[in-house]
Each structure stands twice: as C-alpha cells, then as structure tokens.
Amino acid sequence: MDITVRGTDPFGNEGYKTLFSDIMNDLGEALAVEKAELVLKPEIPLFIFSVKLRSEPINKTIADVASIREEGSGVHITITDERHAPEILNQMWTKYGRNSVDQQTRFDMNVSNANFKEVSETIVASGEETLKEVIGSVWRSMPEGIRVRHVFISGTVVTVLATEEIMLPEYMKEGADVHIAMGGSADV
C-alpha cells in the first residue's frame, strides 16, 4: 500500500502515515488498498483521506473464498480466506441444517446432501459490506471528535472529508479534487 501524506505539520504527517498504515493492517484492509492520499490541515481543521482499492468491491461467493468439490452426495469445502469462515459455516447451517454440516477443522467441512452449484454460488460477503469496512477503517484513522463528514465513492476510489464545524463548499471542492486525482469520477 502506497501512502502519500500532504499536510502543514511534518511531524504530524509522519505520525498519521504510520497510524493509517497500522489501522488498515490491523483491520485487514491493507491488502484491498492500492494507494492512499491523506491531506491534513489541523489548523482549519480539515482532513481528507482518499483510498484507491485494488479492485471494485463485489459480492463474494463461497467459490471465491474456498475450494469446493463434490464428495458423494454432498460437498466438501476447504476455506482459503479465513475471514469468511464464520459466514460460510453460518450459511451452510442455515441452508442445510446443523446436522448436515460436519466441520472437521476450522477450514474444512463436509455438507451432506448439498447441491454443488448452490454451495458455490452462496454469497458470503457483499461489495457494500466491503465498502463499509473500508470507510470504517478510514474513520478510525481520523482524529477523535471530528463529527462532520462527507464521503465520495466512485468505482475503486473512496474519499472521506472531515471537519469539526460546517462543511464549507471549498472543503467539498478540495475533497472532490483529491477524489478525482486518485482516479474517482467527477460526478460524485
């Protein structure tokens, strides 16, 4: 993840770069982020955090996050992305019942009398949830007490503006300019 920081306080710039990187890593979002630009103006106060994601958030199915194979009259699932393990287990219990799911290890399970295609196409994460997680991670990176926020989203770019008082038109314009410079759409 490439992070650029522009701000009026060199010491604060480096601190925010480290904080942002740590939070994104701790919350598991760093792999989804290609680059980020942070604009810090604490004297106003105005903070603009813009991230470009590696790909547009889309719905993820079990086939996207696990290896699946037919086994007898059921399906064997080997989870390859552990973040989705609880949701896969929950979905299989809901669709086929707890008695039909034999969880051998944290990442391996057999589902009796399951339809391979139906299991493969089961959605375990929505693109909207991914966006919410990224935005939540960005909010955690911003100073406490900053209550007035605005979010621009287009394609793979998410830009969050934050200030303490009124969101002035010039703040919105600066945020939109950063959003566009990161590859976002001008019609946000």
Image (cartoon, rainbow, N blue to C red):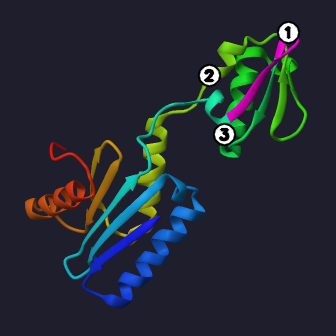
- Label 2 is placed on what type of residue? Thr
Which one is closest to the eye, mark 3 or mark 1?
1
Q: In the rendered image, which quarter is residue 112 located in?
A: top right
Which one is closest to the eye, mark 1 or mark 2?
1
Measure the alpha-carbon separation of dots 2 and 3: 12 Å
Q: Image height check: is 154 above or below 17?
A: above
Measure the alpha-carbon separation of dots 1 and 2: 18 Å
Residue nearest the viewer, comparing 8 with 32:
32
Residue 69 within the segment the image draws in magenta: yes
In the visual, does 150 lie left or right of 3?
left
Q: Which residues are magenta?
A: 66-74
Residue nearest the viewer, comparing 163 with 32:
32
Task: Name the residue rendered at 57%, 58% in the picture.
Answer: 27
Q: Circle 3 is placed at which residue position?
A: 84
Where residue 50 sits: x, y (%)?
A: 32, 60
Q: Image height check: is 144 above or below 128?
A: below
- Assign a secondary structure to mark 2: loop
Q: Circle 2 is placed at which residue position?
A: 122
Where residue 107 sits: x, y (%)?
A: 80, 39
Q: Circle 1 is placed at which residue position?
A: 73
Q: How many numbered markers are drawn?
A: 3
Where residue 123 sits: x, y (%)?
A: 58, 26
Magenta region's main secondary structure?
strand
Task: Name the residue rendered at 83%, 41% in the picture.
Answer: 106
Q: Image height check: is 91 above or below 3?
A: above
In the visual, does 100 lie left or right of 3?
right
